[in-house]
Image (cartoon, rainbow, N blue to C red):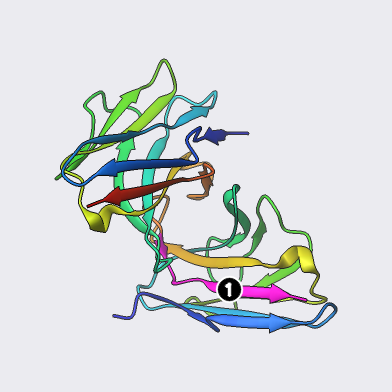
């Protein structure tokens, strides 16, 4: 099992560009999450999904959109990137309200 | 809303010694879970230990143990016989089971350095 994988691992964008981060899990988990990690602030929840076709806003959703068309995939989109979105992004999955399994992270820099 | 506070931005310890990382949280809930996650330089988030609030007994996983004080809303992590591989950022996290869909609220993190 690969667990939780994230694509890409690194990306540099210019202000105003768009991109999509892909998260995939092969553990048949229902719940999936997107977090961002910034220095001194820990991880903060952006969006989450409790099943295929569902999404919901987390603590810091502005500037991001998500989709969960397939159970195993959870996509995070930035329509118009801003320097404030420079961060490390983590995806996680969970079978229910229990331990979350994290991906390796994506380091995004917006110039 | 729940908040989680880790008041120690950085800690250091000598190899083989014991170190305690602090975490406090604020909640009006009675039933919840608490976690400690480790993030080594590789950036991978690894679960170290978990505690269910309804359990009075403190959780233990090998060299890692917690001191859970529910009334004081305190959840500290003790690492015994520290090893070089314990060098990492450690995050305390809070979860309300059932009603919050497993969403985690994290503290700011504590950087732990183990010196040889």
Crowding near the residue tagged with mark 1, few <14, some 14–19, many ≥20 C-alpha atoms within 10 Å:
some
**How many numbered discs sit on the rendered protein?**
1
Give the residue at mark 1.
A107
- The single residue placed furthest to the front in the displayed view is B116
Residue B116 to residue B8: above or below: below
In the figure, is residue A44 to the left or right of B45? right
Q: Main secondary structure of the magenta part?
A: strand
Q: Is residue A104 within the magenta segment?
A: yes
Q: Give the chain of mark 1.
A: A
Q: Is residue A67 within the magenta segment?
A: no
Pick whichever, B7 or A92, lies toward us: B7
Pick whichever, B78 or B15, lies toward us: B15
Tell me residue B89's x, y (percent): 42, 52
Pick whichever, B90 or A30, lies toward us: B90
Q: Residue, x 35% and y 75% (percent of image)?
A: A3
In which quarter of the view is residue B66 placed?
top left
In the figure, is residue B68 to the left or right of A41? left
Q: Residue, x 25% and y 58% (percent of image)?
A: B85
Tell me residue A81's x, y (percent): 79, 74
Tell me residue A29's x, y (percent): 40, 67
Tell me residue B77's x, y (percent): 31, 36
Residue B77 to residue A5: above or below: above
Question: Which residue range is magenta in the image?
Answer: A101-111
Q: Residue, x 63% and y 34% (percent of image)?
A: B1
Residue B20 to residue A84: above or below: above
In terms of secondary structure, where does tag 1 sit?
strand
- The single residue placed furthest to the right in the displayed view is A16
Q: Residue, x 74% and y 82% (percent of image)?
A: A13
In which quarter of the view is residue B34 placed?
top left
């Amino acid at each position: 099992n690969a667990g939780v994988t994230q694509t890409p691992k690194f990306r540099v964008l210019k202000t105003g560009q768009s991109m999509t981060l892909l998260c995939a899990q092969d553990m048949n988990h229902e719940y999936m999450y997107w977090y961002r990690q910034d220095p001194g602030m820990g991880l903060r929840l952006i969006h989450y999904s409790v099943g295929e076709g569902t999404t919901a806003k987390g603590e810091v959703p502005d500037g991001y959109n998500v989709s969960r068309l397939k159970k195993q995939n959870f996509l995070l989109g930035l329509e118009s990137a801003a320097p404030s979105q420079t961060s490390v992004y983590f995806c996680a999955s969970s079978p229910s309200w229990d331990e979350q399994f994290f991906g390796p992270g994506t380091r995004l820099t917006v110039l | 809303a729940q908040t989680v506070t880790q008041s120690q931005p950085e800690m250091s310890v000598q190899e083989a010694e014991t170190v305690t990382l602090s975490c406090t949280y604020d909640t009006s809930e009675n039933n919840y879970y608490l976690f400690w996650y480790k993030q080594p330089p590789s950036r991978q988030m690894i679960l170290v230990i978990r505690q269910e609030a309804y359990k009075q007994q403190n959780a233990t996983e090998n060299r890692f143990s917690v001191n859970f004080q529910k009334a004081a809303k305190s959840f500290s992590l003790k690492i015994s016989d520290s090893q070089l591989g314990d060098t990492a950022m450690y995050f305390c996290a809070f979860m309300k089971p059932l009603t919050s869909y497993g969403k985690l609220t994290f503290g700011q993190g504590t950087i732990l350095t183990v010196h040889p």
